[in-house]
């Protein structure tokens, strides 16, 4: 994604501006010198690559600890590389001198070989890492199926650092996803993160989303399917992408010296596809605390300036720098600047011209650009001087990534048109455009007892089957090895926004630590909640839900299972976006925590809407006299919640035989509890709803209906019910359905009627 660049203004000995005419007098001699120096560098690089391949057979670990040595030994580089006279650089105020370089897709630590020399020359400590299946890491790229696994060399290195040591991360292209993942896992060990035209994605997004707008011309590349790697067989989804030497030359290095192409041809590895398609879970308390800087490449035709502007506008970094496009020149000198301790300042670093290989500001080949800081995304850039356009080295990588994006979409279209591939079409589509939010979390959290008791992140990559299996393993020990404060899990099932969220936030306020919130939405919907809200960051991995189908039960079990991951959750209440509380939080909490029963409506109705929905195919597993009906909006204690999630035998019967006009959400849990746990159920719901008007849906109440008398009639409606085997007039804690227009009138009644 990087581009060739040019520094047009140079200071003379007296501090003035040297003109191009004065420079040209030395150009002939310098050209010859630069050519010999370039020859030497390439020989050294190729020798290093061969040596590292040999060493990898004898030593474990990645290229990072060898090629990115922190040794203080000065590299023996030609004078032209260090630009002759040493340029004074102050490192005293740096928070850290250690810089971790993270390569892009298909590359490895080897692509930073010039950068390493240049940074070491000025006293910095660069380390270039091989990500999993990249460079000389011996892992088969086809076996890399998650971003967590792909980024493991980076996170392992950060994990090994002392708690008081920090580093600067630099990521290019898809390496930005690994940098983002590392920021989420180890924010306290990262001083700064630099994204060079990299995938600085938002929470809940995947790196591939950046290029999703380029899929309209997919059919052009239908014939190029031979470049896909099918590591698990042709009948399975592709696992990677790989090109031969000629394709690498045309797509990556179409204007590079042959030595660069030779080095890349023996060093590049297949590109794992799964990590590119995986969504990230990024939180404000981790990722949001890091200092991020974005370097824009203004002549990038693949990741266009508009797209880069969108990235920094939607996910604003602490600083933005622009690299102006220019002509490629091996003989020109330039000055490179790197971030120092203060976000707004830069540290001058003298370097040779940078290249088109995409590894930060220096690498294979030669070209140069001027980095200019920008205070605001929409601030105009002042040109240093006029510049002459020429074919940029960026064309090669632009063609490749554009090809990659459009090509993958073309494969999907091609498969859909071919009857031969019909059987595997769904699995292919899921790889490129997964319906499920396969998000990663920091693996270190799952190893800690605290993370096991209460996961820090709700997003995860577990399937429903894996999730249900995990939470069904209930502890046998009655004593808890920690101070457990029981919580109530409020589980919201919604198709989209939560219009009454402000009411619920007022209900929850001041009772942190006694409740948990979980939200199930349609897939890929991003809940817009402020950081101060109880709903912020509380979405769980979701699937499509269809009214009247077993997918409603799937969503209920998914909510229960995710809530069960927190061992402090003791009671579980299912709600919708149209539900409201009619009592304050202390009343609700005490009512549920102290109850000896769960609250699931379960009754036998001898009608077409009751027993009439029973299927004889359920016999003998489920008999007619065991069949029950009830409200979908249940409340369960932890024991029953585990039993419901763990059940597959009876769920599969409902999934197979309970179809419209049988509705699983009205029969599955009421029937299951009646069969096995009737003594633990109060056989009533605690969510009030008005069915008096008839029809398939209950009445909905808006602003004109909201009065003190109406709310009081729900709280004390003259009926009596049993609570812990004793009669009580407090039967309903919640009510539905309430329209968005009811919010303001309800807020006006919270303190006077509902008590919060």
Image: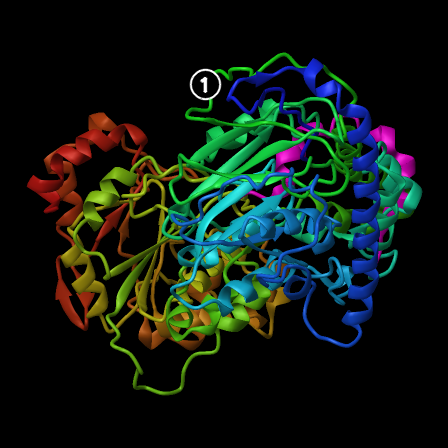
Residue 238 shows in the view: no
Q: Position of residue 8 (x, y in %)?
A: 63, 20
Whether 288 is drawn above or below 320: the answer is below
Q: Quadrant of the N terminus?
A: top right
Residue reaching furthest to the left:
752
Drawn side of residue 35 relative to residue 550, left or right: right
Q: Residue at x 66, y 28 (%)?
A: 213
Rendered position, 614 above or below 626: above
Q: Position of residue 7 (x, y in %)?
A: 62, 24
Residue 260 relative to residue 112: left or right: right
Is residue 446 something one can see in this rendering? yes
Q: Number of callouts in the render?
A: 1
Observer-nearest residue: 76 or 260? Answer: 76
Specify how the rendered protein is coloured: rainbow
Q: Nearer the viewer, residue 88 or 392?
A: 88
Q: Nearer the viewer, residue 604 or 456?
A: 456
Residue drawn at x 58%, y 60% is 154
Check disc 1 and report its element: helix, strand or loop. Answer: loop
In the rendered image, the vertical position of residue 61 relative to residue 381, given as above or below: below
Is 684 one of the magenta-colored residues?
A: no
User: Which residue is the site of mark 1?
Assistant: 379
Look at the magenta stretch and give its main secondary structure.
Answer: helix
| Picture residue at 21% right of the left edge, 25% below the top | 704
Q: Quadrant of residue 134?
A: bottom right
In the rendered image of this protein, does residue 424 appear above or below residue 85? below
Residue 505 location, x and y as percent? 24, 44
Query: Which region is colored magenta?
Result: 205-231
Crowdedness near tag 1: few (<14), some (14–19) or many (≥20) residues, C-alpha within 10 Å = few
| Apparent side of residue 283 relative to residue 5 in the rendered image (left or right) | left
Residue 646 screen position, x and y as percent: 51, 72
Q: Is residue 209 magenta?
A: yes
């Amino acid at each position: 994604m990087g581009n060739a660049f040019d520094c047009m203004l140079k200071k003379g000995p007296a501090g003035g501006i040297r003109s191009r005419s004065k420079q040209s007098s030395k150009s002939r001699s310098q050209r010859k010198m630069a050519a010999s120096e370039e020859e030497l560098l390439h020989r050294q690089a190729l020798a290093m690559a061969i040596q590292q391949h040999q060493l990898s057979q004898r030593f474990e670990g990645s290229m990072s600890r060898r090629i990115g040595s922190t040794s203080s030994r000065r590299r023996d580089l030609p004078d032209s590389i260090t630009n002759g006279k040493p340029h004074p650089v102050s490192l005293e105020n740096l928070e850290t001198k250690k810089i971790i370089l993270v390569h892009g897709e298909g590359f490895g630590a080897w692509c930073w070989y010039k950068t390493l020399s240049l940074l070491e020359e000025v006293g910095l400590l660069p380390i270039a890492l091989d990500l999993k299946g990249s460079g000389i890491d011996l892992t088969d790229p086809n076996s890399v199926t998650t971003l967590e696994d792909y980024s493991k060399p980076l996170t392992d290195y950060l994990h090994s650092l002392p708690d008081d040591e920090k580093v600067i991360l630099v990521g290019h292209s898809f390496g930005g996803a690994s940098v983002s993942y590392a920021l989420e896992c180890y924010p306290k060990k990262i001083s700064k993160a630099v994204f060079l035209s990299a995938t600085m994605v938002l929470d809940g997004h995947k790196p591939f989303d950046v290029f999703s707008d380029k899929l309209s011309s997919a059919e052009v590349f239908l014939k190029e399917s031979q470049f896909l790697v099918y590591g698990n067989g042709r009948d399975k989804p592709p696992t990677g992408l790989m090109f031969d030497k000629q394709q690498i030359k045309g797509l990556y290095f179409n204007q590079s010296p042959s030595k660069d192409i030779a080095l890349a041809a023996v060093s590049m590895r297949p590109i794992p596809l799964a990590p590119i398609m995986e969504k990230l879970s990024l939180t404000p308390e981790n990722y949001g605390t890091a200092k991020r800087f974005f370097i824009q490449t203004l002549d990038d035709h693949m990741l266009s300036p508009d797209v880069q502007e969108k990235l920094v506008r939607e996910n604003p970094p602490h600083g933005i720098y622009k690299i102006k496009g220019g002509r490629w020149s091996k003989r020109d000198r330039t000055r490179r600047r790197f971030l120092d301790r203060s976000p707004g300042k830069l540290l001058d670093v003298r370097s040779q011209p940078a290249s088109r290989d995409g590894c930060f500001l220096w690498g294979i080949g030669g070209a140069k650009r001027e980095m200019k800081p920008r205070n605001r995304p929409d601030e105009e850039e002042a040109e240093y001087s006029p510049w002459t356009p020429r074919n940029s080295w960026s064309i090669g990588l632009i063609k490749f990534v554009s090809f990659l994006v459009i090509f993958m979409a073309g494969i999907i279209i091609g498969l859909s048109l071919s009857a031969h591939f019909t059987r595997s079409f769904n699995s292919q589509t899921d790889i490129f455009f997964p319906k499920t939010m396969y998000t990663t979390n920091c693996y270190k959290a799952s190893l800690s007892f605290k993370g096991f008791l209460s996961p820090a992140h709700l997003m995860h990559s577990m399937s429903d089957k894996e999730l249900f299996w995990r939470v069904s393993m209930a502890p046998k020990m009655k004593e808890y090895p920690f101070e457990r404060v029981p919580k109530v899990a409020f589980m919201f099932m919604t198709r989209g926004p939560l219009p009454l969220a402000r009411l619920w936030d007022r209900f929850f306020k001041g009772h942190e630590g006694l409740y948990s919130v979980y939200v199930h939405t349609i897939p890929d919907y991003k809940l817009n909640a402020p950081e101060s809200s109880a709903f912020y960051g509380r979405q769980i991995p979701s699937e499509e839900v269809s009214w009247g189908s077993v997918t409603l039960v799937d969503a209920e079990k998914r909510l229960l299972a995710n809530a069960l991951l927190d061992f402090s959750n003791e009671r579980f209440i299912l709600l919708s976006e149209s539900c409201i509380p009619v009592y304050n939080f202390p009343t609700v909490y005490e009512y549920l925590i102290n109850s000896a029963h769960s609250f699931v409506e379960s009754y036998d109705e001898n009608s077409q809407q009751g027993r009439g929905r029973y299927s004889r195919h359920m016999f003998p597993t489920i008999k007619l006299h065991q069949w029950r009906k009830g409200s979908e909006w249940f409340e369960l204690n932890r024991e029953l919640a585990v039993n419901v999630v763990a059940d597959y035998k009876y769920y599969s019967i409902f999934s197979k035989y309970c179809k419209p006009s049988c509705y699983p959400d009205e029969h599955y849990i009421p029937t299951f509890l009646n069969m096995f746990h009737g003594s633990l159920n109060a056989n009533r719901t605690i969510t009030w709803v008005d069915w008096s008007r008839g029809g398939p849906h209950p009445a909905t109440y808006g602003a004109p209906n909201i009065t003190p008398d109406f709310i009081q009639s729900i709280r004390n409606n003259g009926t009596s019910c049993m609570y812990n085997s004793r009669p009580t007039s407090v039967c309903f804690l919640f009510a539905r359905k309430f329209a968005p227009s009811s919010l303001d009138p309800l807020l006006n009644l919270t303190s006077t009627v509902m008590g919060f």
